[in-house]
Amino acid sequence: MSPTSARLGAVLRRLPFLAPAAVVLAVGLALCSQGLWIPAKAALAQVLLERAFERSVATGRPVKPWPWADTWPVARIAFPRLHRAVIVLDGASGQALAFGPGHVAGTPDAGDRGVAVYAAHRDTHFALLGQVRPGDEIVVRRIDGHEARFRMAGARVVRWDASGIDPHAPGRALALATCWPLDARTHGPLRYVVWAGPSAG
């Protein structure tokens, strides 16, 4: 038997073992690419949203980040100590939250009377909430140019249907909400809510 025939025979004998390994490898690559796609999409969207936000502030009217978008930027939330900022979209639908934090309908704009509520996914835009500490400043700039400054007062874990958030509460406050636990991969009823009141400085 020639060396080439011997090598071919060895490969053919291994085929029954190679096929399952190839399937496992293909599935693994598919899962990895899907896992990387979500953060990559969120990061790219923030670049486009940042541009749309700046155009909105300059023109005084909402500007869509891409032609087929069904939402638009309404604010930028900055976390100065963390050197991070995110662009907020109008509404908190599943489609909007795929690209950025959403301003929850029925709650006031940040800085207006009541509790402004913003929500985002824990594995993308609000993953940073776990790093926000009491006393940290949170700055919200709206597309009308108004800037509202808050200080984190604390955080708590609540059920999604028992948050205790009253958007019509007296004063001016901010609530940032995401799913809990922050490092979980499965859905559940709990939410992590960061509370902030007006900043004196």
Image (cartoon, rainbow, N blue to C red):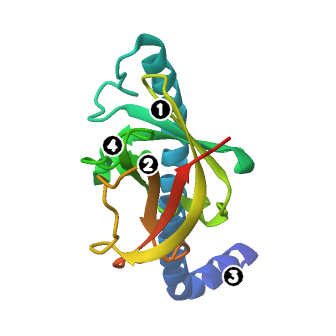
Q: Mark 3 points at which residue?
A: 6
Q: How far apart are marks 4 and 3 (CA)?
A: 76 Å
* Residue at the image position 49 percent from the left and 22 percent from the top: 145
Q: Name the residue under label 4.
A: 108
Nearest to N terminus: mark 2 or mark 3? 3
Residue drawn at x 39%, y 38% is 112
- Relative image position of residue 118 (x, y in whole percent): 41, 51
Mark 4 or mark 1, whichever is nearer to me: 4
- According to the picture, the residue beneath numbered tag 2 turns out to be 101
User: Label 3 sits on what residue type?
Assistant: Ala
Where is the C terminus found, in terms of image quarters?
top right
Label located before the other in sequence (1 or 2):
1
Is residue 106 visible from the viewing direction of this image? Answer: yes
For marks 4 and 2, give the CA distance. Answer: 15 Å
Q: Is residue 109 left or right of residue 124?
A: left
Lower position in the chain sequence, tag 1 or tag 3: 3
Which element type, helix, strand or loop, lies under badge 4?
Answer: loop
Give x and y (percent) for residue 89.
38, 39
Q: Mark 1 points at which residue?
A: 49
Disc 1 + disc 3, Cβ < 8 Å: no
Q: Of the residues shown, which amino acid type is indicated by label 2?
A: Pro
> Camera-side residue: 200 or 131?
200
The picture quadrant where one finds residue 191 is: bottom left
Q: How crowded is mark 1: few (under 14 residues within 10 Å), some or many (20 or more)?
A: many
Q: What element carries label 2?
A: loop
Q: Which part of the image, by quadrant, shows the N terminus?
A: bottom right
Q: Nearer the viewer, mark 1 or mark 3?
A: 1
Helix, strand or loop status at disc 3: helix
Q: In the image shown, does 42 or 54 lie closer to the viewer?
A: 54
Question: Which-is-in-front pick, marks 4 and 3?
Answer: 4
